[in-house]
Image (spheres, rainbow, N blue to C red):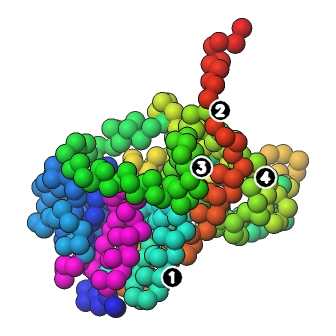
């Protein structure tokens, strides 16, 4: 079924009115009123639904996502709810002739990823996966610099941040947390999560909650930079050479080998320090270049590229580029609008996102079974 958009202002239906909808997507869509108008909301929580409907002045609300998907005044369905439902709801929306935005991760299993890819193809709709970092203005100059470097020796990629609550609570968006999710919905969510973990990891590995936690961390926080690494380095890594983690699974690291002859060390972790430490640093022959991110929950924080190099006279020169204060979520929405209205190609398609599942698998295959004994540093005499 083809989607026949009759206006340049796309009508949006949102499934999931939780934290990311309240702090990021609904405010950004409201600021982009020349491109989008939210016409309907859906959530299993009546409290979240009524709160967002009143706060953002949206008349139509539903607790059944099928009702929203089948509305005539919805051109684009944004899927912002639990990861377990992203793929299935994307397929339903595409089959109803709607364009689709899926907050990452698109899918946790290969079969679900293939289903989304097939739905996009047979319905002729646009489906975007929400890897917003790849739309930051700073990515283009960084990519240009990398293509101009004769040799890359090594790269480091880092995603070590405090819990989201530190940044969300200071965002000025005043989200609410709810506790009125129906029990049958919670039971179904847990069942779907168990099924997906068993398919992605195998029944034996999925029986250990630390393995499931590690996989969720990769599909969540890690997926941003693992996706961007593919873009910057010309595709996926040749192989994962090694990987490790803490006994709790809160911190992980992986060493990748790339076909061009360099290795990349990736680090990820979540702690209780209110700091956002994320970026990619590349070491070349006469130049080092780094892109650094701050929390996306505070709108307008700069994303910078720093170049450190030989000045040609035996000295040292450092240049900092800050191409724009326009945030990646806004740029992502502009790219999606251009894809739907202007038929311009997207970077973060379902086929592109599926490649990350193979990287997750490579990392999980290199991890040793979780250790049950934790020795605290303060215990060492």
Residue 123 lies, in percent from the top left, at 39, 88
For residue 92, above or below residue 286: below
Q: CA distance from mark 4 to mark 1?
A: 33 Å
Circle 1 residue: 345
Q: How many marks?
A: 4
At mark 4, the secondary structure is strand
Q: Residue at x 27, y 66 (%)?
A: 14
Q: CA distance from mark 2 to mark 4?
A: 20 Å
Task: Single out the mark in the foreground, 3 or 4.
Answer: 3
> In percent of the image, x 52 and y 64: which residue is there?
109
Q: Nearer the viewer, mark 3 or mark 1?
A: 3
- In magenta, the rendered stretch is 70-97
Q: Quadrant of the C terminus?
A: top right
Left/right placement of residue 378 relative to residue 293 reads right
Report which residue position mark 4 lands on.
241
Q: Which residue is mark 3?
A: 204
User: Most extreme residue toward the front, as rendered?
Assistant: 204
Label 3 and label 1: CA atoms lie apart by: 41 Å
**Marks 3 and 1, the one that precedes in the sequence:** 3
Q: Is residue 290 left or right of residue 303?
A: right
């Amino acid at each position: 079924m083809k989607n026949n958009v009759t206006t340049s202002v796309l009508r949006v239906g949102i499934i999931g009115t939780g934290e990311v909808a309240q702090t990021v997507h609904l405010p950004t869509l409201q600021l982009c009123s020349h491109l989008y108008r939210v016409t309907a909301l859906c959530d299993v929580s009546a409290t979240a639904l009524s709160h967002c409907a009143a706060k953002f002045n949206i008349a139509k609300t539903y607790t059944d996502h099928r009702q929203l998907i089948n509305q005539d005044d919805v051109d684009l369905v944004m899927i912002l709810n639990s990861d377990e439902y992203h793929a299935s709801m994307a397929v339903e929306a595409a089959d109803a002739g709607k364009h689709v935005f899926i907050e990452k991760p698109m899918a946790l299993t290969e079969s679900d990823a293939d289903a989304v890819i097939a739905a996009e193809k047979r319905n002729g709709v646009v489906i975007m996966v929400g890897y917003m970092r790849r739309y930051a203005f700073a990515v283009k100059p960084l990519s240009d610099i990398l293509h101009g470097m004769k040799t890359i020796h090594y790269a480091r990629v880092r995603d070590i941040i405090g819990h989201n609550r530190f940044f969300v609570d200071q965002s000025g968006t005043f989200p609410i947390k709810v506790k009125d999710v129906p029990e049958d919905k919670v039971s179904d969510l847990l069942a779907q999560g168990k099924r997906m973990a068993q398919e992605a990891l195998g029944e034996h590995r999925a029986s250990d909650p630390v393995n499931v936690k590690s996989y969720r961390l990769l599909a969540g926080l890690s997926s941003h930079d693992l996706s961007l690494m593919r873009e910057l380095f010309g595709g996926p890594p040749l192989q994962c050479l090694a990987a490790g983690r803490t006994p709790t699974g809160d911190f992980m690291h992986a060493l990748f080998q790339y076909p061009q002859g360099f290795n990349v060390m990736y680090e990820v972790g979540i702690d209780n320090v209110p700091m956002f430490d994320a970026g990619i640093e590349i070491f070349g022959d006469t130049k080092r270049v780094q892109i650094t991110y701050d929390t996306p929950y505070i709108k307008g924080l700069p994303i910078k590229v720093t170049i450190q190099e030989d000045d040609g006279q035996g000295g040292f020169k450092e240049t900092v580029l800050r191409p724009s204060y326009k945030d990646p979520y806004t740029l992502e929405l502009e790219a999606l609008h251009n894809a739907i209205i202007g038929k311009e190609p997207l970077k973060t398609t379902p086929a592109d996102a599926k490649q990350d599942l193979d990287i997750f698998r490579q990392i999980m295959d290199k991890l040793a079974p979780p250790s049950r004994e934790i020795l605290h540093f303060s215990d060492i005499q």
